[in-house]
Amino acid sequence: MATIQIGHQTVGPDQPPLIIAEMSGNHGQNLDKAMALVDAAAAAGAHALKLQTYTPDTITLDVHDREFFIEDPTSLWQGNSLYNLYKQAMTPWEWHQPIFDYANSKGMLAFSSPFDLTAVEFLESLNAPCYKIASFENIDHALLAAVAKTGKPVIMSTGMATQAELAESVEVLRGNGCKDLILLKCTSNYPARPVDANLRTIPHLAQLFNCQVGLSDHTPGVGVSVAAVSLGATVIEKHFVLDRSGGEVDAEFSLEPNELKMLVDETARAHCALGKVHYGCTDKEIASRLHRRSLYIARDMKAGEILTVENLRSVRPGLGLPPKYLQLVLGKAIKKATEKGTALTWDLL
């Protein structure tokens, strides 16, 4: 699988997974808190910071009843109209440049999810290094085409899309110039249950669309993300917040800073552990061979005495003959007087 260059970050199967810290609306409409989130993401070791670029009017209609009102009692946002929810969650567009600049100064990539064509135009003016397509927008072919035409890498969440819908979306992206594509397996439920993650889809997506695949993870904790890396995920995206009890719009399914650091560390460790197909000793195991089992004389013996299960045993350490020879040597005579604790070698027989 070819690597992809996004700014100064190289993304690919030979690299630790790219960790994207999703700020979303967890700034609570406070720019100081947004900057504190940048500090927290950088301190945790995240490689990228992501925003969302929309206004209530570019993402929905100013209607506050019927299907535009969230009545689902299981929803985190029950009792809100879509318009009011997005008004609360949006990141003011005038914040983007200072947040991008500050994240860049901390060594992180900074980019966003555009939700309409005006957002793409705006993000192009900020020289965004790549684009993220949210799972709810992956069927918006006009948006996909506009993003693809920038020529920049595209990261797209799969969410609720069927295989056929994804095939159409990928065709639109590639047909409009997208050469560097990363799909993110995603469960569009907030918070999501690990049982719904279906991570075995990751290698299938990679094979199906011949592209890198990662995970946009809305489950609690870091376990699902670590498991995704073992299945080949090259990118992990997670929402984060300064304090989950703070009441921000996405706080309930977001990681706190110490958990974000754990995500960075444990996914890198998981990637490192994948290694390669290997049998036998690693460099660090060579010394351990001393402590394998082998055949040792278990009692003082006289010359000519017969080896039996009483005077010959398979024990640690490993300087004697391998235990597989036990049945072969039982019944053989010992050549010379030998004390207990002597490693059995062929020249003693």
Image: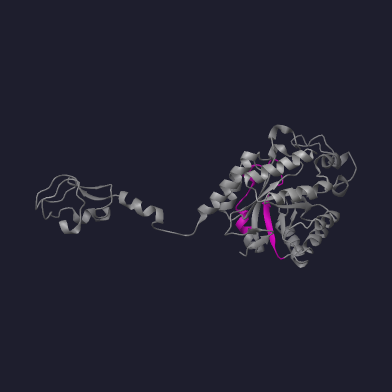
Q: Quadrant of the N terminus?
A: bottom right
> 191 or 55, which is in the foreground?
55
Residue 87 in sight: yes
Q: Which residue lies furthest to the front in this view?
A: 105
115 in magenta: no
- Counting from the top left corner in percent of width and height, residue 233 is at 61, 54
**Residue drawn at point x = 77 percent, y = 39 percent:** 32
Out of 75 and 219, give the one closest to the viewer: 219
Residue most extreme to the top: 245
The residue at the point 55 percent across, 53 percent down is 271
Which colour scheme appears in the figure?
Answer: one colour
- For the residue pair 125 and 294, the one nearer the viewer reads as 125
**Residue 74 on image: x %, y %:** 74, 36
For the C terminus, the image quarter is bottom left
Q: On the picture, is 98 further left or further right than 337?
A: right
Q: In this view, does 229 lie to the left or right of 247?
A: left
Q: In this view, does 344 lie above or below 223?
A: below
Query: Residue 118 appears at what percent x and percent y?
Result: 86, 55
Q: How many labels does the image show?
A: 0
Residue range (magenta): 179-204
Q: Nearer the viewer, residue 302 or 34?
A: 34
| 50 in relation to 10, above or below | above
- Is residue 205 at all visible to an observer of this figure? no
Residue 196 magenta-highlighted: yes
Residue occupying the far right of the picture: 62
Q: Which residue is drawn at 80% across and 62% down?
A: 145
Residue 73 placement (x, y as % from top left): 76, 34
